[in-house]
Amino acid sequence: MAHRTPILAGNWKMHKNHLEAIQVVQQLAYRLEDRDYEHAEIAVCPPFTALRSIQTLIQGDDLKLQLGAQDCHWEDQGAFTGEVSPPMLAELDVAYVVVGHSERRELFGEDDATVNAKARAVLTHGMRPIVCVGETLEQREAGEAEGVVRRQLDGSLAGITAEQMAEVVVAYEPVWAIGTGKTALPSDADEMCGAIRTRIAEQYGQAVADGLRIQYGGSVKPGNVKDLMGQEHVDGALVGGASLDPEDFAVLCSYHRL
Ligand code: PGA
């Protein structure tokens, strides 16, 4: 099996002002100090308003954390009131940008073409997109989960080269598991992450697919992280609620010690 460095990313969503954000990261850093977590990459994705403060903190204290953003526009600049561009993020040493989160798709009308434009723009500016896909409960119950995820994957990754795929992270987040306390069974998560890998192999070849990191997201907590991360095709977690609690997130980061 190819070696893949696991990646755990905390998606803070619309929580924490920049002062609170500093506190969370300081507390996280303190809790990570005596934990063994360096086998994995850890990223924090605060709101845009906290990126600069967290960048300064990470660099000033030489923290082993990556900075992530939760979204971006696809153009470099222009008359797009309220939007933030990829080069603006790259300038703040942002390493990862979440694109196509189900909340963006559902609440802000983003489709696969939008997500694709964002993912490509992120890659163009030397950052890594975390491309989110996942089915709703209705789609799962109708037996459509795999087809839905495959369609999202194909649309969101259109035009991305094999070389660029090495920089892409895919996050499988079943919509019904996000913020609900309902987690996918580790075997179901693995099955879908495996299907994602198979699809990537069909399009990019086995070597690219073997190197692809696929996160599971949806109510990941200290109590279920180990089982999820133990699955063959699950290479990380995209964590919402539990990433706001420094203790919980620190535990998640050292899941292999649980
Ligand atoms: P949750 O959110 O961990 O709170 O379920 C996950 C996400 O939306 O990325």
Image (cartoon, rainbow, N blue to C red):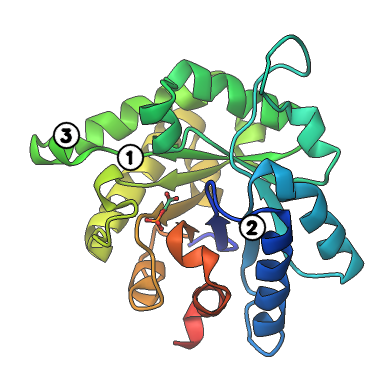
Q: Is mark 1 within 8 Å of ligand 1?
A: no
Q: CA distance from mark 1 to mark 2?
A: 21 Å
Q: CA distance from mark 3 to mark 2?
A: 30 Å
How would you rate the neighbour count of disc 2 (Cα within 10 Å): few for under 14, some for 14-19, many for 20 or more?
A: many
Q: Residue at x 73, y 9 (%)?
A: 79
Residue 139, label in figure: 3
Q: Quadrant of residue 161?
A: top right
Question: Mark 1 or 3 closer to N-term?
Answer: 1
Q: Residue at x 73, y 73 (%)?
A: 26
Q: Determine whether the residue tagged by mark 2 lies in a helix, strand or loop.
A: strand
Amino acid under disc 1: Gly
Q: For mark 1, what is the residue?
A: 134
Q: Nearer the viewer, residue 139 or 213?
A: 139
Amino acid under disc 2: Val
Q: Position of residue 5 (x, y in %)?
A: 60, 63
Q: CA distance from mark 1 to mark 3?
A: 10 Å
Q: Quadrant of residue 92?
A: top right
Q: For mark 2, what is the residue?
A: 44
Q: Position of residue 221 (x, y in %)?
A: 39, 71
Side of 12 relative to 138 (left or right): right
Side of 217 relative to 34 (left or right): left
Side of 26 relative to 252 (left or right): right
Q: Determine whether the residue tagged by mark 3 lies in a helix, strand or loop.
A: helix
